[in-house]
Image (cartoon, grey):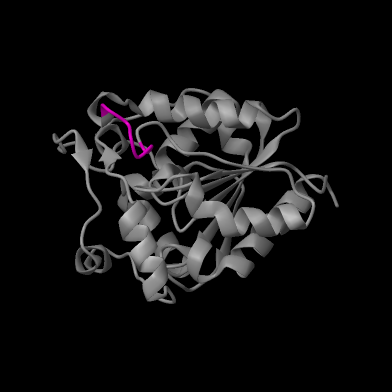
């Protein structure tokens, strides 16, 4: 196999299927790849309101620990919160983290959310909330809409507890799609929860990839190359 293993974690409303095209490219290049569906994001899940943030953290941790070597952990969108928390549990098993149009989140995205689920909003609402659809085809949007699963409340409202300072030494790559890196860095002092980890991590690199908030579909080849390069870098290849 080439480079470090790669674990792919999708963001809100998505399952492992969202990474299918990227994963296929990576595997064709010799990488060991595991894409996961977080608990509650299965289409037939009976009790999404009962899923906890710790369930998400544990699922990511299990995926990381399923490999014998340290992994490159790719986190998309809302998974920046649970994924960053997972690195706190197994910092020695994570070679680097690639934040795909997201960042290491701390706190809760929306602690006041009380409904058991958060369904996929309209396209207009997503765009207004800073999630551009640039480069996505009508077919891709139809697939997204038809396969989207409501996000469990925990993904929005629960706050992970972070205690292990070793996570701060993990190399982090922020792939900037909806917002340029200069803007992100300017926002860091504001204390926004989804950027909070950037105030404490010691090794952060920014990569520009201007496209939709879902680059695994709109810039598949380029995102795969970023992940492939990071995998090879992790093992000195």
Residue drawn at (63%, 68%) of the image = 221
93 inside magenta stretch: no
Q: Position of residue 165 (x, y in %)?
A: 55, 28
Residue drawn at (54%, 53%) of the image = 19
Q: Position of residue 144 (x, y in %)?
A: 37, 59
Please determine whether, in this image, residue 96 is positioned above or below residue 56. Answer: below
Left or right placement of residue 128 versus residue 92 in this view: left
Q: Nearer the viewer, residue 214 or 95?
A: 214
- The number of callouts visible is 0
Q: Position of residue 98 (x, y in %)?
A: 58, 50
Please determine whether, in this image, residue 217 is positioned above or below residue 108. Answer: below
Whether residue 161 is visible to the viewer of this picture, yes or no, is: no
Q: Residue furthest right?
A: 237
Write down the region rendered in magenta.
41-47
Report which quarter residue 114 is drawn in.
top left
Whether residue 163 is visible to the viewer of this picture, yes or no, is: yes
Q: Nearer the viewer, residue 95 or 221?
A: 221
Q: Position of residue 51 (x, y in %)?
A: 31, 26
Residue drawn at (49%, 49%) of the image = 17
46 inside magenta stretch: yes
Quarter of the image where the N terminus is located: top right
Main SS of the magenta segment?
A: loop
Left or right placement of residue 219 versus residue 51 in this view: right
Please determine whether, in this image, residue 208 is positioned above or below residue 76. Answer: below
Left or right placement of residue 158 versus residue 67 in this view: left
Q: Nearer the viewer, residue 71 or 171?
A: 71
């Amino acid at each position: 196999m080439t480079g470090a293993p790669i674990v792919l974690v999708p963001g809100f409303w998505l399952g492992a299927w969202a990474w299918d095209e990227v994963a296929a490219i990576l595997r064709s290049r010799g990488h060991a790849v595991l894409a996961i569906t977080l608990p509650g994001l299965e289409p037939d899940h009976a009790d999404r309101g009962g899923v906890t943030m710790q369930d998400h953290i544990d699922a990511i941790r299990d995926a990381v620990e399923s490999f014998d070597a340290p992994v490159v952990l790719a986190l998309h969108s809302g998974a920046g919160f649970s994924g960053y928390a997972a690195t706190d549990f197994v910092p020695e098993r994570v070679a680097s983290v690639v934040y795909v149009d997201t960042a290491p989140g701390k706190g809760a995205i929306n602690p006041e959310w009380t409904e058991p689920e958060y369904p996929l909003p309209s396209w207009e609402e997503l765009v207004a909330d800073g999630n551009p659809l640039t480069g996505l085809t009508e077919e891709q949007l139809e697939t997204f809409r038809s396969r989207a699963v409501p996000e469990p409340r925990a993904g929005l409202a629960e706050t992970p507890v972070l205690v292990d300072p070793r996570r701060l030494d993990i190399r982090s790559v922020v792939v900037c799609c909806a917002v340029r890196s200069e803007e992100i860095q300017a926002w860091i002092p504001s204390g926004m929860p989804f950027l909070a980890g950037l105030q404490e991590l010691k090794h952060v690199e920014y990569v520009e990839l201007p496209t939709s908030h879902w680059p695994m579909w709109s810039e598949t080849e380029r995102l795969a190359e970023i992940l492939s390069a990071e995998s090879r870098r992790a093992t000195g290849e």
